């Protein structure tokens, strides 16, 4: 489970920097390296990357809590929890680029895969 927790955290940090890179063309490196008091409006792709990052921030606690609880609670179905963690990771990995590209159907499927992974992890906490 530790590997998947770390993988999701790396994915989260990668998404933070990806979002900043999407803003780079319109803001410029000098402005982004400075105080950021006055910045130009974000483009369409940067706005989508921001929204995908906000969605990741909203979903991260719902992954981390059951993932950490697998170390604490007795009688956890670790196999099911690991499969759930993997589904969450792969679903979230696909979600961000699909959101930025504006493809609604596959984006929703990727979100659903991650959500099912989360639900599997919660179920595993009860011995699922």
Image: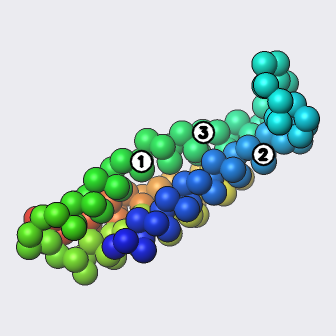
Q: Earlier in the sequence, mark 1 or mark 2?
A: 2
**Residue at image location 82% in from the left, 35% down from the top:** 32
Colour logic? rainbow
* C-alpha separation, residue under disc 3 versus residue under disc 1: 12 Å
Q: Which residue is disc 1 drawn over?
A: 59
* Residue 41 as seen in the image, left or right of residue 30: left
**Do the CB atoms of the residues marked 1 and 2 lie less than 8 Å apart?**
no
Quarter of the image containing the N terminus? bottom left
| Residue 19 falls left or right of residue 82 | right
* Residue bearing mark 3: 51
Q: Residue furthest front?
A: 34
25 or 102, nearer to the observer: 25
Q: Residue 45: where, in percent of width, then height?
A: 76, 43
Q: Quadrant of the C terminus?
A: bottom left
Residue in front for this viewpoint, 125 or 69: 69
CB within 8 Å, label 3 to label 2: no
User: Horizontal and vertical percent for residue 107?
Assistant: 56, 55
Q: Which residue lies most toward the top here?
A: 38
| Crowding near the residue tagged with mark 2, few <14, some 14–19, many ≥20 C-alpha atoms within 10 Å | many
Crowdedness near tag 1: few (<14), some (14–19) or many (≥20) residues, C-alpha within 10 Å = some
Q: Residue at x 56, y 60 (%)?
A: 11
Q: Which of pointers 3 and 1 lies earlier in the amino acid sequence?
A: 3
State the residue position of label 2: 22
Q: Residue furthest bottom?
A: 79
* First along the sequence among labels 3 and 2: 2
The residue under the point 26% across, 65% down is: 121
Mark 2 residue element: helix
Query: Which residue does the image show at 12% across and 64% down from the upper left?
Result: 73
Q: Secondary structure at mark 1?
A: helix
- The quadrant holding residue 58 is top left
């Amino acid at each position: 489970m530790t590997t998947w927790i770390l993988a999701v955290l790396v994915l989260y940090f990668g998404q933070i920097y990806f979002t900043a890179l999407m803003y780079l063309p319109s803001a410029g490196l000098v402005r982004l390296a400075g105080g950021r008091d006055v910045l130009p409006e974000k483009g369409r792709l940067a706005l989508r990357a921001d929204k995908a990052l906000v969605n990741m921030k909203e979903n991260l606690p719902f992954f981390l809590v059951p993932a950490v609880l697998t170390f604490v609670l007795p009688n956890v179905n670790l196999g099911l929890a690991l499969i759930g963690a993997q589904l969450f990771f792969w679903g979230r990995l696909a979600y961000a680029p699909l959101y930025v590209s504006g493809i609604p159907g596959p984006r929703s499927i990727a979100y659903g895969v991650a959500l099912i992974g989360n639900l599997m992890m919660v179920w595993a906490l009860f011995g699922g």
